[in-house]
Image: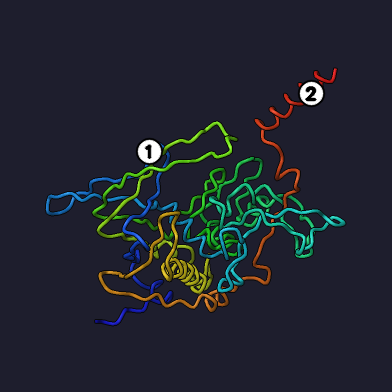
Amino acid sequence: MPEAKKLTPADVLKGESPLVLIATLEPIGSARFQPAGFPEIGHVIYKAPRKDGTTEHVCIVDSAASMANHLESVCMRGPHDYDLVDELSGMPYIRCVTGDLVDGRLPKDKRETVVTSLTEGHRIASSYFRDGVVLTSDGTKSDGKFEDELIKRFGIVLPGSSKAHPPSEMWWNVFKTIFEIDPNSLVHGVLFPLWQIKIPRALTAHLEAFGAGRVDRSGVKFDRLGKTTSGQPIFAVDDVTAESIRATFALDVGLIRSFGRKKGEKPLGLSEKQQEFLVALALWKIRRLLASPFRFRSGCHLRCTALVSDEQDVELDVNIGAAIKAAGFGQQPITDVFWPREELYRKGQTEAAKSAEEDDETEESVE
């Protein structure tokens, strides 16, 4: 059996684009598994045409967006633990935090993490971060919102206009700023619609089952205490069996290379080592996702049996700690964006209106 080819971030960065990796997976404990689906719709099985004129039933197990979520989840210690795993120590990311200020400051041991740029779908562009206030190293609130700092560092201020748009020469500032604050956003893509900034995914993945067959079964919900109006409903559950399950990962190395270059002796955007870090982070995510059985959702627990590129077995050789050091990140890799409790957890319009109605009813009854 031929030895697996080792893929290093440096080799991948200089290689052909895109790098396509295909992982073969199998379900654990049963031949059945549960793909992504929605109530009343179920999951998608379509007929894929083949070159010999036949068709094959293919099931979409996870979309590109879902796979991005899975690839980001492996960076965290757990689904309810928002600290990074030890291997990623020193990698920048953003936290939305709240807590009770002490003399106008929020000490680090008093900060309560609400979400991070690795758990928010819009990453660095989320309003949880843009509309918050950055905390300095001693916990003091900085002047202005986080988005004001981004606009300044991006260099996209348009005098006399409420809009912002990056001139072509300022895109290097955009890439560099995002890299320094939240490099994960350059791997999985980010969109600032008001500023006309759209960076597509460098790493795209999807999970499919081939030769798929639908397994229709049912479930029942018991309300033993009679505390709800649902009674004991019977509901449908769709599972799938398949001849094979494959996860496809496509890394747009050309896009990563476009984040930086030299103009004469002047460096623009990201250095080569910084580009190499983005490749290393993408490969590390893939390796960690496939290293042990991964639960994509309840009823979909899969393990990897093979990983190939160009029909050759490959091994992802990544030293993520060394890549983080070589990238030259600052001493304060975590950006904490503060929201007061009363702003973060304020009532929504519907809830507030309902509360107001209840108050009116109470006042009338008292009278």
| Residue under label 1 | 41
Earlier along the polypeptide chain: callout 1 or callout 2? 1
Question: Of the residues shown, which amino acid type is indicated by label 1?
Answer: Ile
Q: What residue is drawn where x is 23% and y is 54%? A: 211
- Residue at 59 percent across and 56 percent down: it is 117
Residue flagged by tag 2: what amino acid is it?
Thr
| 349 and 35: which is toward the camera | 35
Q: How many marks?
A: 2
Q: Quadrant of the C terminus?
A: top right
Q: Is residue 248 visible?
A: no
- What residue does disc 2 label? 362
Q: Is 225 in front, or is 190?
A: 225
Side (left or right) of 317 relative to 57: right
Where residue 24 sits, quadrant-wise, is bottom left
Q: Nearer the viewer, mark 1 or mark 2?
A: 2
Q: Where is residue 189 in the image (x, y as percent from the top left)?
A: 48, 55
Regarding mark 1 in the picture, which secondary structure is present there?
A: loop
- Residue 30 visible in the snapshot: yes
From the viewer's perspective, is 278 left or right of 336? Answer: left
